[in-house]
Amino acid sequence: TEGAELNDFGQFIKDGKVVAIRDNGTAVCGFPTPSKKQEFYSDTMARWKWNDQTIPGYIKSHIHPDSLDRSRNEYVLVPTFRLPTLIHSRSGNAKWLAEISHRNPVWMHPKTAIHIGLKRSGDLVKVETDIGYFIDKVWITEAIKPDVVACSHHTGRWRRSQDPSGNSWMTSTVKMEESQEGKWKMKLSELVQPFESGDSDSKRIWWRDGGVHQNITFPVHPDPISGMHCWHQKVRLSLPGPNEKYGDIQVDTNRSFEIYKEWLEMTRPGPGPGGLRRPLWMARTLRPADESYYVK
């Protein structure tokens, strides 16, 4: 607090910023907020043109129960469901972890399974998103709530036959084609196979299932305030058709761009005060220099 001035609110001000607050006569660091206090009213939200969000409140998201039509078998999909054995997709080259966890069935409560018409774990389910669908196996368990389904995001790596082999411990080969303008289909053409490498264990791969790639079927949902992707999805569950197989994926890229623009309409024009891209005080890992926060 050297060189700082104490104001009437118990804040030590230096170079126009609050650097500490007084607590029982002692200068303390306080909270990591502009006021160094726990803020009920956010001046930051007001300065960034979100006057209707300056105090804590509840915002109905795109997966709120009011937006789900159960007569159409609409449910909430948790696609960020994590397994304790893998780290996102970054552990795909860890051979022992790949041996333990290499599939990502859709977790589903027995009541939901009965409603959809699924009889046992391993049955196929069609998961339709706003821009497409994927076909996966189901894992029926009471370890998940009836109104929610979940699919792990660690697996489902894929490559085309003309692509470099890359990581082969958990990668399936797919065939991709554009069935209509902007509509793409992807089908499994070869499952995980043993392969030659400097590691003799690569010839001992016994599993064939590399999981289903679900992420590509999700439209871009940028949160209007933070810009972060809203991962949870409203999906429609059904039984696959006679020609739909495990691992089938379809995506409408035109519809994906339309949804992105719909979400973009919910944002408010930037930049922020003083030409800022984001508030300077918000913490982040490996924070860049202040000048990089400004639009030039």
Image (cartoon, rainbow, N blue to C red):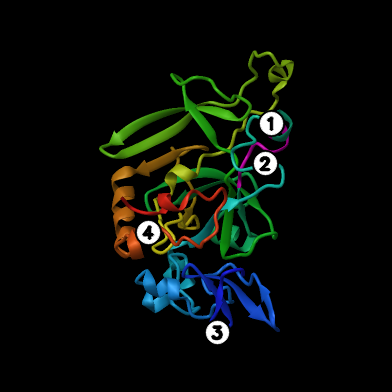
Residue 165 counted in the magenta span: no
Q: Nearer the viewer, residue 235 or 257?
A: 257
The one of 235 and 26 positioned closer to us in this rendering: 26
Q: Which residue is mark 3?
A: 9
Taking the image as shown, residue 120 lies to the left or right of residue 13, namely right
Q: Amino acid at mark 1?
A: Ala
x, y percent for residue 129: 42, 52
Circle 4 SS class:
loop
**SS state under label 1:** loop
Q: Nearer the viewer, mark 2 or mark 4?
A: 4
Residue carrying label 4: 276
Residue under label 1: 94
Q: Residues within 10 Å of mark 4 (few under 14, many from 20)?
A: some
The first of marks 4 and 1 along the sequence is 1
How far is disc 2 from disc 4 in space, using C-alphas? 37 Å
Foreground label between 3 and 2: 3
Residue 136 picture location, percent across and down: 54, 43
Magenta-span inclusion, residue 99: yes
Query: In the image, 204: left or right of 118?
Result: right
